[in-house]
Image (tube, coloured by chain):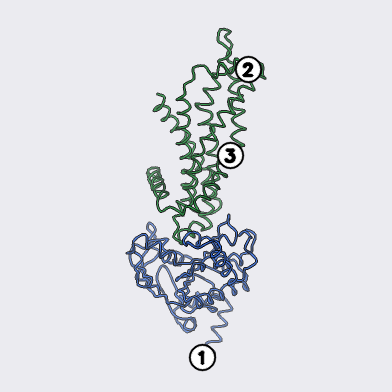
Chain colours: A green, B blue
Amino acid sequence: MNYLASIGSYATMVREVFKKPTKWRIMKSLILKEIDELIYGSLGIIIFISFFIGAVVAIQTALNLTNPLIPRNLIGFATRQSVILEFAPTFVSVIMAGKVGSYITSSIGTMRVTEQIDALEVMGVNSLNYLVFPKIIAMLFYPFAIAISMYVGIFGGWFAGVFGGFLTSANFVEGLQMDFVPFHIGYAFIKTLIFAFAIATIPSYHGYYMKGGALEVGKASTTSFVWTSVVIIILNYLLTQLLLG
Amino acid sequence: MIEVNDIHKSFGDAHVLKGISTVFENGKTNLIIGQSGSGKTVFLKCLLGLFYPEEGDIVYDGNSYASLPDNEKRNLRQEIGMVFQGSALFDSMTVAGNVMFPLEMFTKQSKSEMTDRVDAVLKRVNLIDAHHKFPSEISGGMQKRVAIARAIVMNPKYLFCDEPNSGLDPKTAILIDNLIKEITEEYDITTVINTHDMNSVMQIGEKILFLKDGLKEWEGTKNEIFKTDNKSVTDFVYSSDLFKKVRQMYIEERN
């Protein structure tokens, strides 16, 4: 029953976020700040992880292709498919649930503990719109980060494959172009946008409705990471079945 | 003027406010006192509209809060200034940014008009040099003064303060008390202060409301509090040796 109550409360929160908008002049600066904090501030870790994930996928594929009849360009193909379909949108989103999610929960949770949210409400500000809406809009730019992740991941695969001596650059590029289905990119970005909404709103929910002090802010951050990851994994399954099944 | 009519508030099985009625007048500093757990904070949050009472009504200058439509409730909130216990300043904004925030949100003033108003209000609370500092860079007393400046920047009709002296040294506490009293008279606003600091009661209390177990146990002026025979009030007021001596002197003088 608690889970159902939480889902209902989350849905109510999302509805409130879109009510009584904050002045555009203020909202614009909040959105730019959140883009800087949530997207631009995460590019470093996204690039770092994506490069090495792509490299490891290429090495693992190469090491498992022991049959001489299987062409080496399959390494490029496998890297492309793994990175575009799963590693960039899903794996990076789980990482972002930790990095961005805990930042969102702790910043909103600290505002709750220090009565800053009460201060907004007393002034007549829709605190949910003021705090959560800019994060949702900023996360609309998340697919750009994932596009960079795809590019860097594939580059990592090429780097490890070619410089590890597993295949030639031409082989890798040939594999990249083999059986390419453009909708797979669309599928990845649809997933990314839905994950972006979850990453912006679930941690906000945990921060906004938390009770207690500094210790509870830490607990709320952990809980929000767990729930955001669980939701991403379940949504990933459902979306894959719906869009590719 | 704020009229409170028989308000009740519960959280689950806990009946926190059990029917409180009182009147807070314009231009006066009204103090709510009582032990921890007596319902002071819940009462204040009901006055602020952060909690909705299940029964009873709060009337602000003839407007019943419960019957106001949502947009008018928000308009009313813009006439309320609040000083929170921990100041509740926005960490990411400078002192000037904090004070300017309500103006940016709710007025159509130009940047220069807003800056002039912020300067005037910060000057009023003696903080003219702290414009560009962040809340983490100033003392607790200064944070309280910034909170007062933010609360009065919109020329509120009602000022609420939750434990404005908590965590402050006695000298700074007196400064904050006097500042609140001066502003109340200067702006002719209805000020309600939630406190358990007896020094504040003696310093600025014009009307005092004593809560106990969610009920109004006693109300009166600061002079009347010395004369009362209400045991709960005397136990609370004379819990410190200093005030016991003051009461002793008062009784000796009377005899």
Residue A143 makes an appearance in the image? yes
Q: CA distance from mark 2 to mark 3?
A: 30 Å
The N terminus of chain B: image quadrant = bottom left
Q: How many marks?
A: 3
Image location of residue B167, percent across then percent down: 59, 66
Image: A80 above or below A16 = above
Say what amino acid the circle numbered 3 marks. Answer: Ser
Chain of the residue under the numbered disc 1 shown in the image = B
Rendered residue at 44%/60% (across/down) = A124
Q: Amino acid at mark 1?
A: Arg
Q: Position of residue A115 (x, y in %)?
A: 51, 58
Residue at (52% x, 71% y) in the render: B196
Residue at screen point 55% across, 17% down: A175
Residue that lies at the very extreme toward the top in this rendered image: A69
Residue under mark 2: which chain is it in?
A
Judge from the rendering whether residue B2 lies leftward or rightward of residue B203; answer left or right: left
* Separation of residues labelled 1 and 3 (CA atoms): 73 Å
From the top left corner, tell me how far across and down residue A57 is, in percent: 58, 22
Q: Is residue B228 above or below residue A232?
A: below
Question: Dot 2: what SS?
Answer: helix
The chain under label 3 reads A
Residue behind mark 3: A42
Q: Which residue corresponds to mark 2? A: A169
* Gap between marks 2 and 1 measured at Cα: 103 Å
- State the image coordinates of residue B49 (x, y, percent, origin top left): 41, 63
User: Which mark is drawn over residue B254?
Assistant: 1
**Is the C-beta separation of discs 2 and 1 under 8 Å?**
no
Q: Amino acid at mark 2?
A: Ser
Q: Is residue B217 left or right of residue B139?
A: left
**Which element carries disc 1, helix, strand or loop?**
helix
Asked where in the image residue B48 lies, by quadrant, the reply is bottom left
